[in-house]
């Protein structure tokens, strides 16, 4: 497994790293751009996935910010909020908190226990949440 750096409860991956197999992080995880996971990614805290990164299977976390142009081939399951930034592609989302979908996102079904906010034009499957807000073009 590639080297991880730790500061308190937060772990940091090196830029442009490949992780083979499944990865589990006990804490928060900040992932720089162009980092790739060839298995499942499990994070007990918050996940910040840098731009143009990818996950081959599913993501499980407390909360997530998915960077622009990321690709996640499995579902994201989060206890809290999920933000998916511009032009990312995600299989599906199940969130206990709010879900924000930015311009150009491609996502399957999205289920939220709170509000789903769509900011700009997206392509999606079924959107299911307590509230729905659509902003921008």
Image: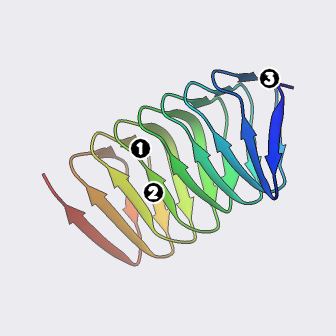
Q: Position of residue 15 (x, y in %)?
A: 64, 26
Write down the quadrant of residue 41 in the picture. top right
**62 vs 75, nearest the viewer:** 62
The answer to whether 83 is drawn above or below residue 122 in the figure is below
- Real-space Cα separation, disc 1 to disc 3, in angstroms: 25 Å
Residue 20 circle label: 3
**49 vs 59, nearest the viewer:** 49
| Viewer-side label of 3, 2 | 3
| Viewer-side label of 1, 3 | 3
Mark closest to the chain's N terminus, 1 or 3: 3
Look at the numbered disc 3 and give the secondary structure of its residue: loop
Q: Position of residue 70 (x, y in %)?
A: 49, 33
Q: From the viewer's perspective, tell me whether residue 66 is left or right of residue 41.
A: left
Residue 110 circle label: 2
The answer to whether 96 is drawn above or below residue 3 in the figure is below
The residue carrying mark 1 is: 107
Q: Which residue appears at 73% of the width and 41% of the height?
A: 12
Residue 34 circle label: none
Q: Residue furthest front?
A: 7
Residues at discs 1 and 2 in contact (Cβ within 8 Å): yes
**Number of marks in picture:** 3
Q: From the viewer's perspective, tell me whether residue 32 is left or right of residue 109.
A: right
Q: Which residue appears at 29% of the width and 58% of the height?
A: 118
């Amino acid at each position: 497994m590639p080297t991880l750096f730790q500061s308190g409860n937060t772990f940091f991956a090196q830029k442009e790293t490949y992780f083979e197999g499944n990865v589990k992080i006990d804490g928060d995880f900040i992932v720089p751009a162009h980092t790739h996971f060839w298995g499942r990614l499990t994070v007990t805290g918050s996940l910040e996935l840098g731009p143009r990164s990818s996950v081959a299977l599913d993501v499980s976390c407390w909360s997530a910010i998915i960077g622009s142009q990321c690709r996640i081939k499995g579902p994201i399951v989060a206890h809290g909020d999920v933000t998916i930034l511009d032009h990312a592609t995600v299989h599906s989302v199940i969130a206990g908190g709010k879900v924000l979908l930015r311009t150009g996102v491609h996502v399957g079904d999205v289920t939220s226990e709170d509000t789903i906010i769509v900011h700009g034009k997206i392509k999606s499957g079924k959107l299911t949440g307590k509230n729905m807000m659509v902003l921008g073009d």
